[in-house]
Amino acid sequence: MAGLTAWQSVFEHGRVRAGQRVLVNGAGGGVGGFATQLAAHAGADVTATASPRSTATVLRQGARRVVDYTTTPLEKGVRTPVDLLLNLVPLPPEEATHLNRLVRPGATSSR
């Protein structure tokens, strides 16, 4: 189920293509791990959030950079606007809305 959810998020809803910048918020989880692999396989430049214990795994799954959410605010860890934001972390609505600032105008946010 996690793999199917990731597939739908990355390809059916996100329509990820090579060269796009993708942010997977919550890459250390089941759906996030699959989403990271699928986006990287599609040729996307993947930035992922994970804890220190998941960093090595997320990098092996294809993320080019990992933001340690326990020490770094996402706004400081993601310097270039992304083409697709996959937010897999349960956040209050005001925090989830705040993440949209990381997405370039006209791009896709999947929360």
Image (cartoon, rainbow, N blue to C red):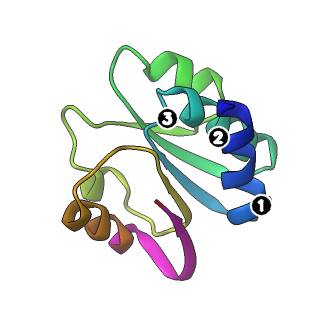
Majority SS type along the magenta span: strand
In contact (CB < 8 Å): disc 2 and disc 3: yes
Residue neighbourhood size for the residue with mark 1, other residues' Cα within 10 Å, grouped as few (<14), some (14–19), many (≥20)? few
Q: Residue at x 30, y 62 (%)?
A: 96
User: In front: mark 3 or mark 1?
Assistant: 1
Residue neighbourhood size for the residue with mark 3, other residues' Cα within 10 Å, grouped as few (<14), some (14–19), many (≥20)? many
In contact (CB < 8 Å): disc 1 and disc 2: no
Q: Residue 103: x percent and y percent?
A: 46, 71
From what the image shows, is residue 2 above or below residue 55? below
Q: Residue 101: x percent and y percent?
A: 34, 73
Q: Is residue 106 left or right of residue 95?
A: right
Q: Amino acid at mark 2?
A: Ala
Q: Amino acid at mark 3?
A: Ala
Work out whether mark 2 precedes mark 3 in sequence or the reverse, and give the earlier one.
3
Q: Which residues are magenta?
A: 101-110
**The quadrant where residue 50 appears:** top left
Residue at which label 3 appears:
27
User: In front: mark 1 or mark 2?
Assistant: 1
Residue at which label 1 appears:
12
Label 2, secondary structure: give it. helix
